Each structure stands twice: as structure tokens, then as C-alpha cells.
């Protein structure tokens, strides 16, 4: 079946450091790929998405590129802030499945001042 | 603020009991999906309702059931609760079953089964 694997956390960084969270997927067909963020006490929020190979999603300084050849969608940010502390989830959906999401296990990120 | 609300925010039940969780969708959204998020894990898709009909189900037993009402609010019912049902339950509403960027999640209901 379809699945998403992400690096385990927690990831602890200092402010202004570079952040990378690895995400790889297994899917039958060509999925759309997403990164969601869950801030403490809040619901999941869509951070960015990409729908086809080589697409780059970006939002709030975060970027991820859909790499079909490596089945990956790694999340990056060049300079993190304390406010980026959250749990990040990589997810996919297939067109036939509409917006029913398959999520990875999540990566907790803690940014220290 | 997504406009998706869930109630209650927390509850505690004992094994074997039944529970009903509620979700109020964003205005104009006719699709609602439910997810189970166990502690330290990613959300898992339970089922989706579209215009009051079930529109897909994940790998959950029949004791997980749902309803969607004409005003598109929704309920998740779980019978014969087990300890492993302890989790955060999320609902997400969207204008259609294909809407991706306009699917919004509620804050969740945290269920503890003792």
C-alpha cells in the first residue's frame, strides 16, 4: 500500500540554523505531496504542496521539491525561528483518492533562541 | 482560524464503553474526513463523508462508524472502546472530496480510554 516515511525527531536547532526534514514515499501511481505543520494546541495546517515531478512547493520560507526519481519530498528552510517549533508531517494523496491523506509519522522540531 | 470546530476537546472513557465525537464543518463544506492520531504518530484516515454518504474508509473495524447531517456537521462513533483507541481524533472539512488546498483540520478531540 501507499506509505510515507520521514526522519524521526526530535530535531533540535538553534535560531537561524538550516533545517532539513527528509521524507520518502511509496505509492502506486503519481501522488500529490504535502507538508503539514502542527503547532502546539492547534490543528494541522497545510504548509505547502506539489502535484507533479520537479514541482517546488514553497511557503513561509519553507521549500520542498517533488523528486520522482528518488521518491522524495524533503522539507528545507534556510534560517529557522523559534516560532517554527512544531511537528511537521509529510503526506500524500493519489488522484483517485481525492483528498484522503496518507501521513508520515511526523518530525518534531524544536528551535532554541 | 479554520472554522472547523470539534467537541469535546478532551474526554475519558473506560474500556467497553461507547463514545461520540462531533465536528462542525466550515460553512459551505460538504465533505468531512476523520483521522486518528495516536501519540507520537501521524494521523491515519478513518473514513470520509460526502453529502451524507460514506465516501471511502481506511483500515478501521466496523465499530468505528460515522454520520454526516444535512447541515454537514458530522459525528464519529466508536463502540466497544479498547485501550488502543486512546488518541487524538481529527476531523477535516473541504468543499469537495477532491479539494486539497482548501481542506481544513479542526483542533481535535483527545480521547483517553482506561
Image (tube, helix red, strand yellow):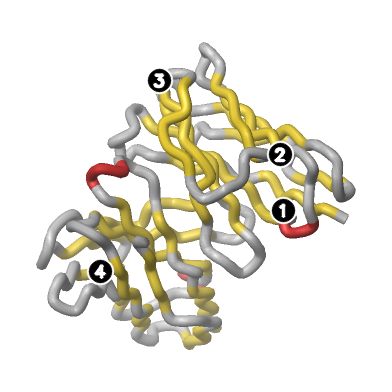
Labels 4, 2: front one = 2
The numbered mark at residue B78 is 2
Categorize mark 2 by other alpha carbons within 10 Å: few (<14), some (14-19), many (20+): many
Q: Are marks 1 and 3 in contact (CB under 8 Å)?
A: no
Labels 4, 1: front one = 1
Query: Which of B100 and B62 lies nearest the eye of the viewer?
Result: B62
Query: What's the CA distance linking mark 2 and mark 1?
Result: 9 Å
User: What kind of element bears circle 4?
Assistant: strand
Residue labelled with disc 1 = B85
On the same chain, marks 4 and 3? The answer is no
Query: Which of B42 and A59 lies nearest the eye of the viewer?
Result: B42
Query: What's the CA distance linking mark 1 and mark 3?
Result: 31 Å
On the same chain, marks 1 and 3? The answer is yes
Q: Residue at x 68, y 45 (%)?
A: B109
Give coordinates of residue B28: x percent, y percent: 40, 20
User: What kind of element bears circle 1?
Assistant: helix
Answer whether residue A83 is visible to the viewer in this image. Answer: no
Q: Are marks 4 and 1 in contact (CB under 8 Å)?
A: no
The numbered mark at residue A63 is 4
Query: What's the CA distance linking mark 4 and mark 1?
Result: 35 Å
Query: What's the CA distance linking mark 3 and mark 2?
Result: 27 Å
- Where residue A18 sits, quadrant-wise, is bottom left
Amino acid at each position: 500500500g501507499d506509505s510515507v516515511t520521514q526522519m524521526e525527531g526530535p530535531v533540535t536547532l538553534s535560531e537561524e540554523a538550516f533545517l532539513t526534514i527528509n521524507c520518502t514515499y511509496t505509492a502506486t501511481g503519481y501522488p500529490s505531496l504535502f507538508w503539514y505543520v502542527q503547532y502546539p494546541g492547534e490543528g494541522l495546517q497545510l504548509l505547502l504542496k506539489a502535484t507533479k515531478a520537479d514541482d517546488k512547493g514553497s511557503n513561509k520560507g519553507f521549500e520542498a521539491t517533488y523528486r520522482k526519481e528518488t521518491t522524495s519530498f524533503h522539507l528545507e528552510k534556510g534560517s529557522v525561528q523559534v516560532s517554527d517549533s512544531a511537528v511537521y508531517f509529510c503526506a500524500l494523496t493519489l488522484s483517485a483518492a481525492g483528498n484522503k491523506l496518507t501521513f508520515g509519522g511526523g518530525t518534531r522540531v524544536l528551535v532554541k533562541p | 482560524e479554520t472554522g472547523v470546530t470539534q467537541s469535546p476537546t478532551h474526554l475519558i472513557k473506560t474500556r467497553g464503553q461507547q463514545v461520540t465525537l462531533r465536528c462542525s464543518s466550515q460553512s459551505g463544506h460538504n465533505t468531512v474526513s476523520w483521522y486518528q492520531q495516536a501519540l507520537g504518530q501521524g494521523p491515519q484516515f478513518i473514513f470520509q463523508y460526502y453529502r451524507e454518504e460514506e465516501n471511502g474508509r481506511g483500515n478501521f473495524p466496523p465499530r468505528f462508524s460515522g454520520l454526516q447531517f444535512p447541515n454537514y456537521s458530522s459525528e464519529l462513533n466508536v463502540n466497544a472502546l479498547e485501550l488502543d483507541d486512546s488518541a487524538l481524533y481529527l476531523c477535516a472539512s473541504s468543499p469537495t472530496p477532491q479539494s486539497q488546498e482548501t481542506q481544513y483540520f479542526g483542533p481535535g478531540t483527545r480521547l483517553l480510554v482506561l
